[in-house]
Image (cartoon, rainbow, N blue to C red):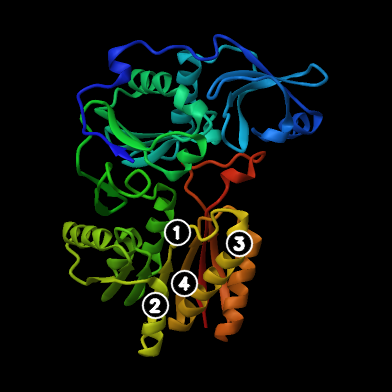
Amino acid sequence: MMVQGASSGGPAASRAPTAPGSRKDQVLVNLTGAARVLSGHLWLFRPHLVGGDPEDGAVVRVVDTRGRFLGMALHSARSAIALRLLTSEDRVIDQGFVQERIVAARARRAPWLSGVAAYRLIHGEADGLPATVVDVYGQHLVVQTLSAGSERLLPLLVAGLVEVLAPASILLRNDPAVRLLEGLKREVRALEGVPPPQLYLREGPIHLSVDLWHGQKTGLFLDQRENRIAVESLGGRHILDCFTYQGGFALHAAARAEQVLAVDVSREGLERVKENARLNGFDHIRPLEGNAFDVLRSLALGGQRFDLVILDPPAFAKNRAAMEGALRGYKEINLRALKLLAPGGRLVTSSCSYHLSEVRFGMVLREAAADARRTVRVLARRGQGIDHPVLLGVPETSYLKCWVLEAE
C-alpha cells in the first residue's frame, strides 16, 4: 500500500475532468443477464456477457441479445462483477451526471441528518454511483473508489463534490484490499486541501477523536452510528464492550454505568479509547487488550457478570466459502456473552457479514441461547444507519444486523 502525504491540491485542482462515457462502448449480455437487470439488480457477472470487448474501467452501453437497451454501466475486466449499472437512461456519463447523483444523495439524507457531524453521503449502488463511497466528517470528505469503473470516474466525482459541497479537504482512502481484486493499487492521498491528521467531532452527546488517514474504514464505522446512540437508553451498572475499536459503543453506554470494560486486540485502538474517555470525562472505562474469544472465556471462568454486553465483531464471513467457520464463530461469542449476563441483562450483538442473512443470524442466536440455557427475548432488531440505504433489487446493499436481546 502506498501512502502519500497531504498536499494543497490534487488531480481535480490541476486539470478539468474528462468525460468517460462520451464514447459509448457496447456490451452484449444474454437473456439471463437481461432478466437480472429488469428485476432490479445492478450487477452482471462475466458469464452474462456474450459480446463486446471494452477496456477496463470503461463506461459501456448494455444491450441484450434481442437488441433491448438495458442501461449504461461501468465495466471491470478483472472482477467477477463485470458490469455495474449506472442508469437505465441512454446518456453520456459526465460531470453533470455525477453531480446530479451527489445532489440527490444529499437531498435524500437532509430530513434525517441535520446537525449530524459524520455520515455517509454516497453509499455506492444505493446512491447511483456503484463501488463509490463518500463519507462526511464535518467540513472534510473521505472518498473511496472500489472498482476500475469508479476509479475512472474519480476526477468527475471530486469536481462534483467541490462544486456542490465546497469541502475544506478531500482525502482518498483507497486502501481496502478489495481493490486488489480489480487490479488497482492501494493508496491514501489528499485530493483537495489538507486533510487534518486528527479531527474532533460529536456523535450525539459523545465527543470523539477521529483519524481519517489511518483509522479503520474511513475513520469511523458510520453504519453503526444510530445503534451506538441507541445503547444509551439500555443502562446497566457493569458493561462489557467487545471488539470496541475506539470505544464507540462503550462511550455511549458509559454515562449511566459504574464500570465499562472495553476489549480489543488492537493496542492502537485502545489508545484511542483512552483518549476518547478523557475527552468525555469518563474515568470508569477500562481498556483491555486481548482476543475477545479468550477474554469472554476468562471472564466467565472468573464468575463475572454484566448488565450489558456488546458484540460488534468484524465480518467473519467475507465470502460464502467462509460461512461454516463464521457460523461457529458467531455462535461461540454469543454463547459466551449470554453466559456472562446477569439476570435481566441485555446483549447487543451485531454481524456485518452480508453472507449471513438475518434469518440465519437469528437461528445462530437461538442456538446460542439454548446452549447457554437462557430464556432470551428479542427487544429490537436494528440494521445499518439511514445514511446507508438499501436497494430492494440489490440485496447485497443490506448487510448489517444489530439485535438487542434480554436474558432472564
- Looking at marks 2 and 3 on the same chain, the residue that comes earlier in the sequence is marked by 2
Q: Which residue is mark 3?
A: 323
Q: Residue at x 39, y 72 (%)?
A: 292
Q: Are marks 2 and 1 in contact (CB under 8 Å)?
A: no
Q: CA distance from mark 3 to mark 4?
A: 23 Å
Viewer can see residue 379:
yes
Between discs 3 and 4, the one toward the N terminus = 3
Between the C-alphas of marks 4 and 1, the distance is 17 Å
Q: Position of residue 306 (x, y in %)?
A: 38, 80
Asked if 335 appears above or below 267 in the picture, the reply is: below
Query: Which of the two discs, 2 and 1, labels the residue nearer the N terminus?
Result: 2
Q: Residue 393, located in which quarter of the rendered image?
A: top right
Say which quadrant the N terminus sits in. top left
Residue with the mark numbered 1: 314
Q: Which residue is mark 2?
A: 294
Circle 2: residue type: Asp
The residue carrying pointer 4 sits among few (fewer than 14), some (14 to 19) or many (20 or more) residues within 10 Å by Cα, namely many
Q: Circle 2 — which element?
A: helix
Q: CA–CA distance between discs 2 and 3?
A: 22 Å
Q: Quadrant of residue 197?
A: top left
Gap in angstroms between the C-alphas marked 2 and 4: 18 Å
Q: Hey, what amino acid is under mark 1? A: Pro
Between 218 and 283, the residue placed more toward the observer is 218
Q: Amino acid at mark 3?
A: Met
Q: Residue at x 62, y 74 (%)?
A: 366
State the CA–CA distance, disc 2 to disc 1: 16 Å
Q: Position of residue 193 (x, y in %)?
A: 22, 26
Q: Residues within 10 Å of mark 3 (few under 14, many from 20)?
A: some
Q: Position of residue 120 (x, y in %)?
A: 41, 39
